[in-house]
Amino acid sequence: MLLALLLPHVTQADPSSWRPIVLSELPPGHMAEIRVAADVPTLVRFESELDPAGTRLQEQNSSPFESLDVSGRLLLLHPSASAWLLPRMHLQVRRMDGTSLILVLVPSPPALADAQVDVFLHPFSPGALRAALERVGAEHEALKLQYASSQAELARYRDDEFNADVAIAVLLLDDEASSHLVKDNVLEVKNADVRASAWFVRLAGRSAYVFLVMNRHRTENWTLGQGLILNDRTRESLPVIVRARPSIIPPGGSGRVVLVTRTPPSAGKARYEVQLQGPDGPRWQLCYYGAEL
């Protein structure tokens, strides 16, 4: 019953904590080692069914395991939460065909303990080949996702290459290149930890806000989450291009953020709210109300 309850938690572990052991590839005189830790369940899978009566610790002292369960081809090791000083132990595992092997249980930190171990007799056994195919299939799926992501990123870069909004944002990010575009009428925006000077620029049918952001916090970085331009009355969010240099500003540092949008038909009548949002709550958020476009 305990094996059935713990099995889903073990099999959902980080794939990096899974590893195979091929007995025929061990150096002469060496035994297979399983890394165990207090309150960390470890699932060991074999190619053939195990004999529960013949699977036991060789040491005669009291067992540190909350459970040592055998079910078919599966062996579950679950040291108790209080077993922080685990000794190095030897576990005899007997198969239903009468053959046996010894596993060495090696105490490890919880982060390094095995979540799942597959034990194979040799690299070309059916179980080993099946596991290798599963591993290659998983790697193939990961590569497909990586390829799709890189293609999407490449498409975005290609779109950006001919996007006038992006070109204006990049231009305004550069101090020297934008110096003749940014006027003297400076807007001040601040909160407890962040302060910004802002300039409004209208160029080629676009409206842009340029922020010089100063992080006044003594120990924490300011990170740009997103930039928004909202209609004050309708709360409609305008399509906006956001660029920052750098996107993470260290304590005491400064950086530049640019928001560019197509100048809307209602630019002379409506008022807008310009927001720079950080990921860590309102104290990192900068807002300018009553903005014109």
Image (cartoon, grey):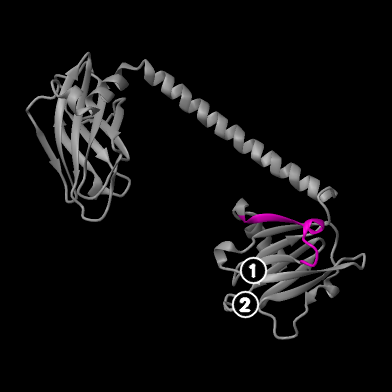
Residue 76: name its quadrant: bottom right
* Residue appearing at x 83%, y 53% in the figure: 122
Disc 2 target residue = 86
How crowded is the residue under tag 2: few (<14 C-alpha within 10 Å), some, or many (20+)? some
Give 176 or 249, whichever is nearer the viewer: 176
Asked if the residues shown at circle 2 and circle 1 are in contact, with their CB atoms under 8 angstroms apart, the answer is: yes
Percent x, y for residue 123? 81, 50
Percent x, y for residue 54? 85, 74
Q: Residue 11 shows which numbered tag? A: none
Instruction: Decide if residue 255 is on the left or right side of residue 81.
Output: left
Whether residue 231 is visible:
yes
Give 29 or 197, whichever is nearer the viewer: 29
Label 2: state its secondary structure.
loop
Residue type at mark 1 is Val
Tell me, yes or no, whether the highlighted magenta stretch contains residue 221: no
Give 132 or 262, whichever is nearer the viewer: 132
Tally of marks: 2
Q: What segment carries the magenta color?
A: 17-30
Percent x, y for residue 60? 75, 85
Residue type at mark 2 is Leu
Disc 1 target residue = 36
Is tag 2's residue or tag 1's residue first in the polypeptide sequence?
1
Residue 10: name its quadrant: bottom right
Q: Is residue 40 above or below residue 175?
A: below
